[in-house]
Amino acid sequence: MTLYILAAIVICIILGYTTKINIGLFAIAFSYLIGCFGMGMKAHEIVELWPLKIFFVIFAVTLFYNFPLANGALEKLSNHLIYKCRHFPAFLPLVIFLVATIIAGLGAGYYTVLATMAPMILLLSKRTNLNLVIATLSVNYGALAGANFITSQSGVIFRELMRGAGVANDNTFTYVLGIFAVTFIMPMIVLGAYSFINAKNSKIAIQTTIPEPFDSKQKQSLILIFIMMAIVLIVPILNLLMPQVSAIQFLNARIDIGFIAIFFALVSLFLKLGDEKAVIALIPWNTLIMICGVGMLISLGVEIGVIYELTEWLSTNVPIWMIPILVFVISAIMSIFASTLGVVAPTLFPMVLPLAVASGLSPLLLFTCIVVGAQSSSLSPFSSGGSLMLGASQVVINKDKLFNALLFKAVPLDIGIGILAILLIQLIF
């Protein structure tokens, strides 16, 4: 049954890639076939494997954040931020990264930032003579880092997946902050070094028009985002700083980003900050189906001990110092053809705690290896990030040129940088 589960995961990825049908749908079908006919489970027991908590949180958070997307607040904010930095052309890669980080961190999420910013960045690259590989890496790094923030899409999903893997609630907060820190600091160093080295010989020239001012609804949306972020962040941070205060413990146990997001979505509806139908239509249903469908299949694997067997093999056959690198490489290879959120994280997160116990490695290190590894190849043209970038090229950049730049330059460079980062992080842990 272990082989069947592993084979099913691989087949789902292959079928999803070749047919362009959502991987989650294939995973649901395999869950039924393996669970009912291979493991003797009843159909309702398979249905109960659907990760309802993850589904609810993603639905609620994206519902709220879709208001500033629908009314154009986040897109206009990105234009304002780039315009503010027009006098520092040599640092354009760093500016793009920081703008993408802020927009994604405010709740837009990885896919939305790429979809909205990629056309602008590719056009900016052409007009300003910015290196195409650096331009794509800058916006991709920023979208990933911002989305990994504790209140944004990827950060929320990572926390729920960690909880499902047995990590305590307070630890999920710390681990996701650690992942965000690594995915923010690493690009800052890389892009900052590139900008400083090329500052004297830079031929970049930013020519932008003055962006339109925010209207009242856009201002209200941005204010609501900051209020919600403050509520979600302050209580857990206070709990980490003052764990003995019972009142803070009481609040921390009841602060739930999903329910809070629903309240703020209702406030947004009362204030008429966006059309309800348009906002609901923007919910990433494909991502939800993929994450939850694969989650069902992974839950079957947990039932029969797949995670234990993989952990046992890694801890007994691989030198301990090599385990983080191997986990990184496995994640990177998987992410070339599959989604980090939908496939890689749900598949590999459950083995972190058993592997940490067996090897003595820090769970934070292993979680970081998985995320950094998966995100290092996210610009692959065969993965979601690269395909979004190609889709955004249109007539701005030749698609063949962009395809080759992504696959043969951006991805290998990003993986190499990621491996160096993991080696340095290992020294810390």
Image: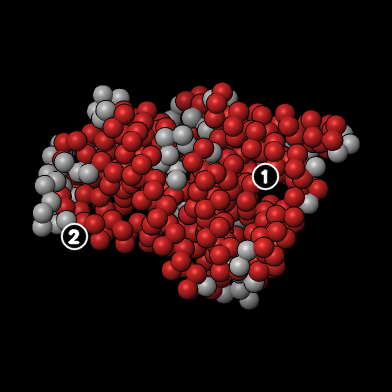
In the rendered image, residue 253, in percent from the top left (x then y), is placed at 66, 60
Which labelled disc corresponds to residue 257?
Answer: none
Q: Of 28 and 77, which appears nearest the observer? A: 28
Figure quadrant of residue 219: top left
Horizontal side of 333 relative to 295 (left or right) equals left
Residue at the disc numbered 2: 197
In the rendered image, residue 237, in percent from the top left (x then y), is placed at 52, 66
**Amino acid identity at mark 1:** Lys
In the rendered image, residue 419, in percent from the top left (x then y), is placed at 44, 59
Mark 1 vs mark 2, CA separation in Å: 47 Å
Instruction: Decide if residue 395 is in sight here.
Output: yes
Q: Residue at x 38, y 60 (%)?
A: 186
Q: How many marks?
A: 2
Horizontal side of 291 relative to 71 (left or right) equals right
Residue lying farthest front? 317
Is 251 placed above or below 404 here? below
Q: Secondary structure at mark 1?
A: helix
Q: Residue at x 19, y 35 (%)?
A: 126
Colour pattern of the rendering: secondary structure
Query: Mark 1 or mark 2, which is nearer to you?
Result: 2
Figure quadrant of residue 296: top right
Residue at the disc numbered 1: 53
Q: Secondary structure at mark 2?
A: helix
- Residue contact at pointers 1 and 2, CB within 8 angstroms: no
Q: Residue at x 58, y 29 (%)?
A: 16
Q: Of 195 and 19, which appears nearest the observer? A: 19
**Amino acid identity at mark 2:** Ile
Horizontal side of 400 relative to 362 (left or right) equals left
Q: Residue at x 56, y 23 (%)?
A: 19
Q: Of 97 and 236, which appears nearest the observer? A: 97
